[in-house]
Amino acid sequence: MPMQRLSDEPKTIQSMQDLLTTARSMEQEAVAGYQALSERMVREGRAELAAVFDRLVAEEQDHLGMVEQWSAQTGVPCETVALNDEDSVFDDEGAGIVAPQMLNAYRAFSIAVRNEERAFVFWTYVAAGAPTPEMRSAAERMAREELGHVATLRQERRRAFHALRRSDATVVRSIAFLEERLTGALDGQFSTLEAADLADVIALARQARARAAAVRSWPFAVSMTVAVPRNGEAPNLRGLSELLLDCYLDLAESCKDQAARELAQIFAGELIHCLSVVRRLETRS
């Protein structure tokens, strides 16, 4: 899945104290964000989701402890400060206000993955603009840590994806059905687009139609269905794209037939491009 972009490039960090203070503040922001979501799920009677967000709180507290240990080892003090917009990477993506029935463990881990991806990109920017070799090395270390967190959370998201498929709260839909929904969602964008974006979206809709036709006649013995929520709103354009991407990534990992695996990888690549276009459109809306 493509890494998240930042809405603004981070400010230049001028000292190790500034770097560690920023790192500590980012981790504390994530702790507070997931804690607030956990508390909301408790109030809404969603104990199973509160437990997921509690796990994310614990993960972020571990990351915070690592930063504080690094500060103690180097003798460089770090504080907690309010982050500027360009330094803030935590986003609950509306989970704090949407109807609780629209949330599940898969979405919770998806939110966490994207937050960690933005943190990785943040530290990559910082490393590129670091004024000293020491600070560049420190920022690269933070980027590596965040990338490790991304990998761990992606594994958790994949487990949640499989659990969702087995849940009584979901209904099984064919991937062809979801591709048709994606095609319709893309077609629905035509009237709102500028000429510069229209060609991209037309091409994406054409690809989605072709994938829908291909999976209907998929010649290999693999599952071509996916679980979607039985109740609640249908996934939006980005949600459909992400759901289908995970389907094809899962198929690419599980297919024993090389031709099927390669086709699933091609389709995943198309969905990655689709997501990048969708996110670009979202920033303009």
Image (cartoon, rainbow, N blue to C red):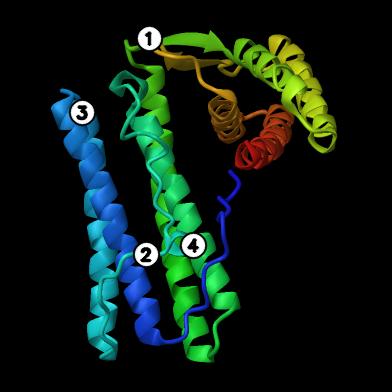
Classed neighbour count for the residue bearing mark 2: other residues with Cα under 10 Å, few (<14), some (14–19), many (≥20): some
Classed neighbour count for the residue bearing mark 1: other residues with Cα under 10 Å, few (<14), some (14–19), many (≥20): few
Closer to the N terminus: mark 3 or mark 1? 3
Element class at badge 1: loop
Closest to the camera, between mark 3 and mark 4, is 4
As measured in the structure, the alpha-carbon distance from the residue carrying label 3 to the one carrying label 4 is: 33 Å
Judging depth in this view, the residue of 226 and 253 nearest the camera is 226
Q: Position of residue 222 (x, y in %)?
A: 59, 19
Element class at badge 2: loop
Q: Is residue 56 visible?
A: no
Instruction: Name which residue type carries label 2.
Output: Leu
Residue 212 is left or right of residue 248, and the answer is: right
Closer to the N terminus: mark 2 or mark 1? 2
Instruction: Name which residue type carries label 1.
Output: Asn
- Residue 231's label in the rendered image is 1
Closest to the camera, between mark 3 and mark 1, is 1
Residue in view at x 59 percent, y 32 percent = 245
- Residue 86's label in the rendered image is 4
Instruction: Name which residue type carries label 4.
Output: Glu
Q: Which residue is mark 3?
A: 48
Closer to the N terminus: mark 3 or mark 4? 3
Asked if 21 appears above or below 211 in the picture, the reply is below
Q: Which residue is mark 2?
A: 83
Judging depth in this view, the residue of 284 and 233 nearest the camera is 284
Judging depth in this view, the residue of 147 and 124 nearest the camera is 124
Closer to the N terminus: mark 4 or mark 1? 4
Element class at badge 4: helix
**Callouts 3 and 4 close, C-beta under 8 Å:** no
